[in-house]
């Protein structure tokens, strides 16, 4: 395969295809009318080339659905800001029913933000929306942004969807500490894979990302307990497989797995992926 995934931001085009395809189903569990345009032809080419992701599109659908549900739940509970880090081509601020007063921040690398802003220039967000071009690996710059946002809100939900799997352990630890230092960043929702699943992902999908700078690497053996050292308390996690079963997105073989009882996390010696909700121990 030619190098289709040229850089880490191209992974956002790939994920957007699963949002587009779900949205186009008669029984869609979410509707993102902008996803196909945002993904572009390149997004489709990438999804087609990575067969493993196509076979497991249920896991993307479940993940997106679970993030939607957590966002809805927190907005209903009165959270006044969503800090969407590594937002990519996520158009939730344009597609979800949100209060007009909700502050929504999409943060991503400059090229991704410019591309997205250009495509969405004539679209109207549902809430108070800002997109911020920032390299999140620049710790000084990101902490400046986090402090500014912390001063602007009372209760924020931080979302990082499809980000931490690409980070090294020290980078996730530092990001966890920096987020928990902001006392109004009350909760954090992210997706996590078990170490056993990471091995499958690396084998099946890493070759397609070769040369892009994107490496699948973060899946701690201790699961969500990893974050307890860095200022976060685990509230709950939901398995993508179980969510996909409830949404009727599994084939018969996977349905049988989904029906099996899951040993309680966080140490999972089997392929598992899901969405985790954490609370900031410094929140006030
Ligand atoms: C797999 S995509 C996920 C995008 C989106 N959250 C979603 O679920 O569709 C990963 C995203 O991380 C962004 N990203 C990676 N490294 C970053 C960095 N250092 N600073 C800001 N964004 C970054 C990429 O540009 C890309 O949009």
Image: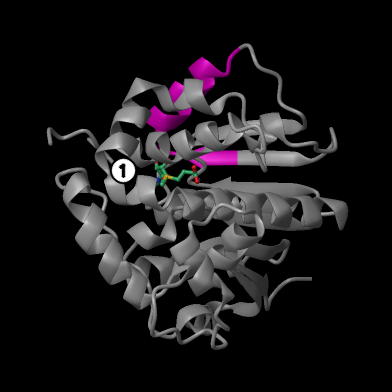
Residue 282 among magenta residues: no
Picture quarter with ligand 1: top left
Give the secondary structure at mark 1. loop
**To which residue does mark 1 refer?**
8
Q: Is residue 167 above or below residue 96?
A: below
Residue at the (68%, 73%) spot, across then down = 279
Q: Is residue 217 above or below residue 80?
A: below
Question: 229 or 123: nearer the eye?
Answer: 123
Residue at the (58%, 14%) spot, across then down = 121
Left of 223 or right of it: where is 202? left
Q: Is residue 137 above or below residue 167?
A: above
Secondary structure predominantly adopted by residues drawn in magenta: helix
Question: 229 or 34: nearer the eye?
Answer: 34
Residue 224 visible in the snapshot: yes
Residue 153 visible in the snapshot: no
Where residue 163 sits, quadrant-wise, is bottom left
* Image: magenta residue range: 106-121
Q: Position of residue 167 (x, y in %)?
A: 35, 61
10 Å neighbourhood of mark 1: few (<14), some, or many (≥20)? some
Q: Say if disc 1 is inside 8 Å of ligand 1.
A: yes
Quarter of the image with the N terminus in it: top left
């Amino acid at each position: 395969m030619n190098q289709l995934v040229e850089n880490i931001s191209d992974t956002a085009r790939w994920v957007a295809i699963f949002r587009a395809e779900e949205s186009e189903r008669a029984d869609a569990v979410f509707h993102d009318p902008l996803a196909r345009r945002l993904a572009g032809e390149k997004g489709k080419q990438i999804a087609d080339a990575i067969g493993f992701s196509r076979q497991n599109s249920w896991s993307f659908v479940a993940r997106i659905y679970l993030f939607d549900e957590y966002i809805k739940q927190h907005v209903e509970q009165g959270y006044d800001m969503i800090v969407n880090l590594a937002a990519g081509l996520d158009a939730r601020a344009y597609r979800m029913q949100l209060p007009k007063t909700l502050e929504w921040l999409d943060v991503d690398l400059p090229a991704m933000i410019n591309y997205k802003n250009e495509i969405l220039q004539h679209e109207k967000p549902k809430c108070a929306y800002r997109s911020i071009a920032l390299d999140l690996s620049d710790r000084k710059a990101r902490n400046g942004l986090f402090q500014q946002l912390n001063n602007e809100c009372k209760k924020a939900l931080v979302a990082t969807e499809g980000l931490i799997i690409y980070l090294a352990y020290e980078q996730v630890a530092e990001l966890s500490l920096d987020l928990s230092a902001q006392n109004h960043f009350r909760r954090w929702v992210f997706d996590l894979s078990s170490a056993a699943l990471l091995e499958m992902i690396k084998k099946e999908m890493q070759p397609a990302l070769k040369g892009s700078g994107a490496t699948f690497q973060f899946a701690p053996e201790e699961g969500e307990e990893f974050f307890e050292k860095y200022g976060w308390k685990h509230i709950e996690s939901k398995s993508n497989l179980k969510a996909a079963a409830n949404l009727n997105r599994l084939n018969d073989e996977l349905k049988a797995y989904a029906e099996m009882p899951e040993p309680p996390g966080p140490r999972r010696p089997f392929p598992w992926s899901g969405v985790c909700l954490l609370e900031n121990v410094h929140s006030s």
